[in-house]
Amino acid sequence: MGEPVHGEITELLLAWSGGEASARNELIPLVYAELRRLAQRQLWHERADHTLRTSALVNEAYLRLVDASRVNWQDRAHFLAVSAQAMRRVLVDYARARKSQRRGAGVQPLPLEAAANVQSPQSTDLVKLDEALTALAGEFPRRAQVIEMRFFGGLNVEETAAVLGVSEDTVLRDWRAARIWLHRAISGEGAHAG
């Protein structure tokens, strides 16, 4: 079977939005490969010993998408953007859970000398990034959406512009400004870039 036509995916998304459960069932096999690609992209940023695997991330995100209140799907790019956001939420929840487990749930305390040599895993960075993205969304919502769609969703400039209903130049400006803002926020330099 060849690649599904974007129009076919869009038609199924619109039918799903209209309440046709059978459309959702037809859609998932068509977009599964893209969801796996999104999951692999998201997990690529995680540490090597991360225990959440691609299939598990796809399944968790799918459950959140199905369980979410009715979404008015626009097209394939919109679906991928929302899917990327769902995957990001799964990974952040996972990182927070692991972080809380490290805080002492049944763990024997380390001597101070040994604790000084423990390095913080990359999942903490994901939590910091999520907090920074949430702050960015509070000040510049569209810029945060651009980061989610391009970085987490793997959408190109054209697809991002189509989902947001803005020009490609606007997406590129938002992309540059948001990356600077996030870098400053995460590094503690202050994030106030207009």
Image (tube, rainbow, N blue to C red):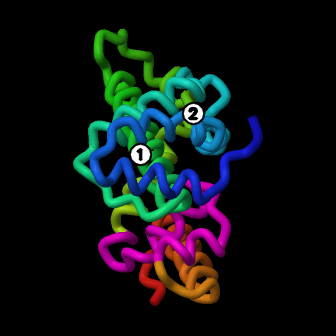
Q: Which of 94 and 105 is in front in this view?
A: 94
Residue 193 location (% of width, % of height): 47, 85
Q: Which of marks 2 and 1 is nearer the N terminus?
A: 2
Instruction: Please identify the quadrant where the N terminus is shown.
Output: top right
Residue 44 location (% of width, % of height): 67, 40
Q: Is residue 99 visible?
A: yes
Instruction: Please identify the quadrant where the C terminus is shown.
Output: bottom left
Mark 1 highlights which residue?
A: 86
Q: Could you tell me how far apart the alpha carbons at marks 2 and 1 are, in whole angstroms?
A: 18 Å
Q: How crowded is mark 2: few (under 14 residues within 10 Å), some or many (20 or more)?
A: few
Q: Which of 183 and 77 is in front in this view?
A: 77
How would you classify the magenta stretch by its main secondary structure? helix
Residue that appears at 47% across and 49% down: 12
Q: Which labelled disc corresponds to residue 29?
A: 2
Residue 158 lies in the magenta stretch: yes
User: In the figure, is residue 82 to the left or right of 170?
Assistant: left
Residue that appears at 38% across and 31% down: 99
